[in-house]
Image (cartoon, rainbow, N blue to C red):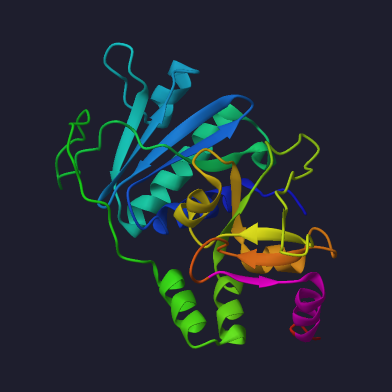
Amino acid sequence: MTSPSWPEIVERLRDTVARCDRDTDLELTAAGRGIRLLVRRDVVRVLCPGYDEARLAVLGWRRPAGDAQWWYESPRSPEQMDRLSMMVARTAAEVLTDDPGALSCRPVPPAASAVRPATAGAAPTEPAVVAEPAELTEPAVVALLAAAANRRDLPGYLGVPAGAMVCVPLAGEPAADGEVPWTVVGDATGAPLLPVFTTPQALAAFAGDGVPFVALPCAELLEDWPDESWGLAVDAGSARAVTLAAPALAALLTANAPTG
């Protein structure tokens, strides 16, 4: 599978944040360095250690008080998430790695304090300790999967993630040569399956916090399937989970291969 470009990293960051359906902390890492995104219902705060303070200042990060990390905060609106994702990707290119393929993103245990929602027209301030209820509304993709599973509509179910971004857990950090260390699980017979998840929360519920993953379009993954001997497991461990053994997956991909 080809390494993602920086514009693709921007798109994946934006889509991953958009699909967080409750308070979620994400960490973007490469080569032992990281940037943390605190995703809340109305606002996203981003934290970065002072790897290169001059560059962070030029990129628009806010200088911390005392020993705190550099930070930036934005309302969680589509327009602002486009801008924030570009800023985070540019920062990653400046202070984490010059290779977008070396980046991994993972959910991590929530920070001790929530962030204060941004006020229109006001400059962001340092975070206050506020208890906010988790957002319980399911994203559209999860609701569609649940509905398809309830009516036992396998083609309809598999068509949902094919048109969406998915999170795929990794066994470690991507290699410098672009080799991706996919995590493979076994079905009841021991046959290998590649697990994919429709949200970072579904991945964390199955694999635990802190597991590295890549977020990418499911169609791209299916088009360049890593190993023909692997089947597919969607949202493993959940009530809407579906698995396809390798022969069934191969038949599905062949039947839906683009023509012309």
Q: Please state which of residues 102 and 160 is positioned toward the viewer in this rendering.
A: 160
x, y percent for residue 135: 28, 56
Look at the image and tell me whether residue 79 can be seen.
yes
Judge left or right: residue 234 versus residue 15. Answer: right
| Residue 86 image position (x, y, % from top left) | 47, 45
Report the predominant secondary structure element of the magenta stretch: helix
Q: Is residue 56 above or below residue 110?
A: above
Q: 120 or 170: which is nearer to us?
A: 170
Q: Nearer the viewer, residue 65 or 21?
A: 21
Tell me if 179 is positioned left or right of 48 in this view: right
Q: Quadrant of residue 118?
A: top left
Report the magenta residues as a range: 241-255
Q: Quadrant of residue 64?
A: top left
Furthest toward the front, the residue is 188
Q: Quadrant of the N terminus?
A: bottom right
- Residue 95 makes an appearance in the image: no
Q: Quick check: is 219 in the magenta stretch?
A: no
Q: Residue at x 47, y 32 (%)?
A: 35
Q: What residue appears at the point 57 percent right and 48 percent down from the top-left corner?
A: 9
x and y percent of residue 107 in the render?
A: 48, 43
User: Horizontal and vertical percent for residue 198?
Assistant: 52, 63
Q: Quadrant of the C terminus?
A: bottom right
Residue at far top of view = 66
User: Residue at point 72% right, 48% down?
Assistant: 182
Q: Quadrant of residue 165?
A: bottom right
